[in-house]
Each structure stands twice: as structure tokens, then as C-alpha cells.
Image (spheres, grey):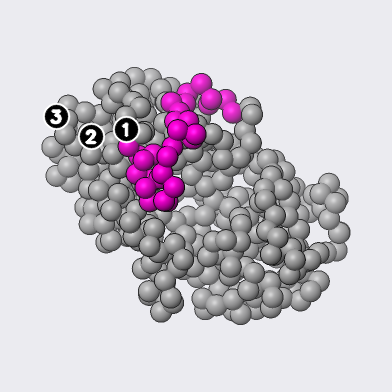
């Protein structure tokens, strides 16, 4: 087994990893810190601007950054390609044992490594797939999502990375099936290693105390939605709110308010502004339910964070949301409609917080240290596995 202290990793992701962000940025931040604690040397290749404020980011000195002002492309797909190309040009691959890519931004480095006889191992993490939403909407007999055209163009980049990677990490079984079925990557090169949340940050607080600290009404009925409204799940959330009683308040954790939403719903919607992780944990503890009305998801970090804080989520009964949420730890909506989702919310509110304890127990099964150890174990396998064997699927 390789000595962890001798493994050198280049971590490639779209934006600077930050404790204040969500999604991939938070995941890579926590993964990098966990690997460093285990003796792995990590450098991060990314667009060097914080997606959200992170003035105290301890990883700042580990960043090999691209200045966002130097990026020229305006078309979304061309911007993905430009960043991918710039990331590949910014590092000397020979300095690393492993290059670990997150998302389509590893496309050019994968092409570059494929031309080398001796090269670092390539690991690609799939937090979702670009073709996944299109396939899900087609299976549900729904019109194509707004992002379909861009997703289809990006899918070629992801598929190429999958083919050329020594190992692919899928964050859920649903994503693994897509990497294998939609991209044709051999199953022997795809490993499922789930996401997680930091239990030192996301843990339950007393609901009444959390509401008092946040200035919320003690007896109010509060839903929490994390994200913005110009994406598919945000549009569904707006449709759901139109069907709910007017005494239900939606707390929206996002750094920018949506004028159209505030104009329509007035005091029924409260935008929180930017939230640090600790304050977000308070909102999870204060809310009655987490709303995650997405028809497609790779894993959903906010789901597991809310559950860890005792806030049961409401999700559609679809992969990968139904891999995280069980009947006893949250609410699964059977029909992919806003009306069914709203009806489930009303039923859940009438039950009180009877599923809070089960939600916390379920969240504990996605242990951060266990998952990071699994990624380190994968690193050790690909570092010591000859390229010919890895690419043959042995």
C-alpha cells in the first residue's frame, strides 16, 4: 500500500473550493482538507474567485488559479471549454501522482494525459451527468428542461473524461448507472462513493432557540429552500408555493433576492442573504421542512445537511433523492407534479416534526471520514495499478 504522504494530487474544479459555498465547491473544500489531514499533498486548479465570500479560506495557498477577468468566452459551452483548456495549460502533469477532476473542466487534461506514455492516474468525479436531466424528463414524458441544449454539448466532454479515466467516482447509484449506461464507461471502472456533510457543523439545535436567534415566529410554519429560482427546481418551488396556505412562509437561503418572487409573494417569502455554514445549520434546525423539489439530482448536499440538523426533507421519489431519503426519515412525493408536492408538504406539516430523529439517524450513515477514506483507498489502487490493467477494466 502506498504511503499517503507520498501521493500528490491536482484537484480540478470549476470555482475556488470554499466553506461558504454549496455543491461541488463545498465538497472539494471538505475533501481537500480531509486528504491533507491524511498526509496527501493537494493543489487545486480552478477559476480563482470565491463563488461566495470566503475570506478565511485556509486552502488559498493551495490554489493554482485562473483569473476570471482573463476568460473571454461568453457562450456557456465555450466558457466551459476555455476553462478546461486553461486549466490543462496551467499545470505540469508530471508533478502529480493523481489528477482528480470534478465536472467537465477536466476534458482537456484528459486528452493531454491520453497522449502520454508515463502519466499520473486520472480520476473523475461525477456529481451528476449532463445527460441525466434530459433522460429523466424524457422518462417522465415532460418537455425538455431549459438547460438541455447546453447539457447535451457538455455531455461529450464528460463522456470523453469517463472513457479516459482510470477510475470514475459516482456520488450515488443513480449517477453510476448514468455513467455506465449513458456514457458507456465499463462498470469495473466506476465506484460509488457517496457525498457527506460535516457533523461538526451540521447538527441539530433546539428549534425554539434557533427561531429566537433568527428572529422567526415561535409558532410559525416555515419551509426552507436552498437555491435560486431561475433553475428547474426553483420554478417548481414557485408553483408549489402558489398552492400552499398563505400562512406558510418560505425561507430562501440565497445571497441574491429574486424581485419577481418577492413581488408576487410579498411577506410569504423571506430571502436570508448569504449564510455561513453555521448560520445555515441554524436555519435547518428552525425550519419545519426542507424543500428540494428537483426532478433530477446527483445526490443533493442540502438534503443530507438538513437531515443532520433534524429537518425532514420533501423530495420526489426519484433517484438519487430516494437513495438518501427514506419513508421514515423524510417525505417522498410519488407524482412529479407541483400539486402532489404541495399536498405532501401540507400532510407533513400536519404531522409536526415526527421524523426529525429518524432524519438525523439517516444522515449519520453518510459519514464524512468513511467516504474520504474510501477516496484515499481508490487513490492508492490507481497509483499502484499499471495503466494497461486499469484501462482494460481489470
Question: Which of the marked residues, 3 or 2, is nearer the chain's N terminus?
Answer: 2
Nearest to the observer: residue 70 or residue 382: 70
Q: Which residues are magenta?
A: 57-85
Residue indicated by mark 3: 117
Nearest to the observer: residue 362 or residue 18: 18
| Residue 215 falls left or right of residue 166 | right
Q: Quadrant of residue 382?
A: top left
Residue indicated by mark 2: 112
Quadrant in the picture for the C terminus? top left
Q: Alpha carbon of mark 1 to alpha carbon of mark 2: how far?
A: 8 Å
Question: Which of the marked residues, 3 or 1, is nearer the chain's N terminus?
Answer: 1
| Residue 291 falls left or right of residue 120 | right
Q: Of discs 3 and 2, which sits in the foreground?
A: 2
Tag on residue 88?
1
Q: Is residue 354 above or below residue 48?
A: below
* Residue 53 x, y percent position in the rendering: 63, 36
Question: Is there a contact, CB below 8 Å, between mark 1 and mark 2?
Answer: yes
Dot 2: element = helix
Amino acid at each position: 500500500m502506498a504511503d499517503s504522504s507520498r501521493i500528490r494530487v491536482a484537484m480540478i474544479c470549476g470555482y475556488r473550493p470554499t466553506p461558504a459555498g454549496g455543491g461541488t465547491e463545498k465538497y472539494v473544500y471538505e475533501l481537500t482538507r480531509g486528504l491533507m489531514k491524511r498526509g496527501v499533498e493537494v493543489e487545486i486548479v480552478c477559476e480563482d474567485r470565491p463563488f461566495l465570500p470566503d475570506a478565511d479560506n485556509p486552502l488559498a495557498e493551495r490554489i493554482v488559479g485562473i483569473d476570471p477577468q482573463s476568460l473571454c468566452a461568453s457562450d456557456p459551452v465555450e466558457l466551459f471549454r476555455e476553462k478546461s483548456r486553461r486549466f490543462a495549460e496551467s499545470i505540469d502533469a508530471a508533478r502529480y501522482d493523481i489528477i482528480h477532476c470534478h465536472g467537465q473542466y477536466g476534458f482537456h487534461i484528459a486528452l493531454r494525459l491520453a497522449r502520454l506514455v508515463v502519466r499520473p492516474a486520472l480520476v473523475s468525479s461525477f456529481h451528476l451527468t449532463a445527460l441525466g436531466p434530459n433522460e429523466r424528463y424524457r422518462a417522465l414524458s415532460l418537455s425538455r428542461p431549459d438547460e438541455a441544449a447546453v447539457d447535451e454539448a457538455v455531455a461529450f466532454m464528460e463522456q470523453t473524461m469517463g472513457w479516459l479515466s482510470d477510475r470514475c467516482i459516482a456520488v450515488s447509484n443513480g449517477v453510476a448507472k448514468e455513467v455506465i449506461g449513458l456514457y458507456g464507461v465499463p462498470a469495473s471502472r466506476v465506484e460509488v462513493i457517496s457525498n457527506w456533510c460535516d457533523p461538526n457543523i451540521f447538527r441539530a439545535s433546539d428549534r425554539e432557540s434557533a427561531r429566537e436567534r433568527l428572529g422567526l415566529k415561535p409558532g410559525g410554519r416555515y419551509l426552507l429552500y436552498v437555491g435560486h429560482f431561475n433553475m428547474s427546481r426553483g420554478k417548481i418551488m414557485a408553483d408549489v408555493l402558489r398552492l400552499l396556505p398563505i400562512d406558510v412562509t418560505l425561507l430562501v437561503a440565497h445571497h441574491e433576492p429574486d424581485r419577481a418572487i418577492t413581488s408576487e409573494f410579498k411577506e410569504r417569502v423571506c430571502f436570508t442573504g448569504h449564510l455561513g455554514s453555521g448560520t445555515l445549520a441554524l436555519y435547518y434546525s428552525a425550519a419545519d421542512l426542507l424543500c428540494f423539489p428537483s426532478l433530477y439530482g446527483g445526490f443533493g448536499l442540502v438534503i443530507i445537511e438538513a437531515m443532520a440538523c433534524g429537518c425532514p426533507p420533501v423530495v420526489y421519489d426519484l433517484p438519487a433523492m430516494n437513495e438518501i431519503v427514506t419513508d421514515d426519515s423524510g417525505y417522498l412525493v410519488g407524482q412529479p407534479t407541483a400539486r402532489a408536492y404541495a399536498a405532501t408538504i401540507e400532510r407533513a406539516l400536519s404531522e409536526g416534526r415526527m421524523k426529525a430523529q429518524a432524519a438525523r439517524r439517516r444522515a449519520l450513515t453518510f459519514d464524512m471520514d468513511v467516504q474520504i477514506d474510501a477516496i484515499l483507498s481508490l487513490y492508492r489502487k490507481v497509483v499502484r495499478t499499471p495503466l494497461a490493467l486499469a484501462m482494460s477494466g481489470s
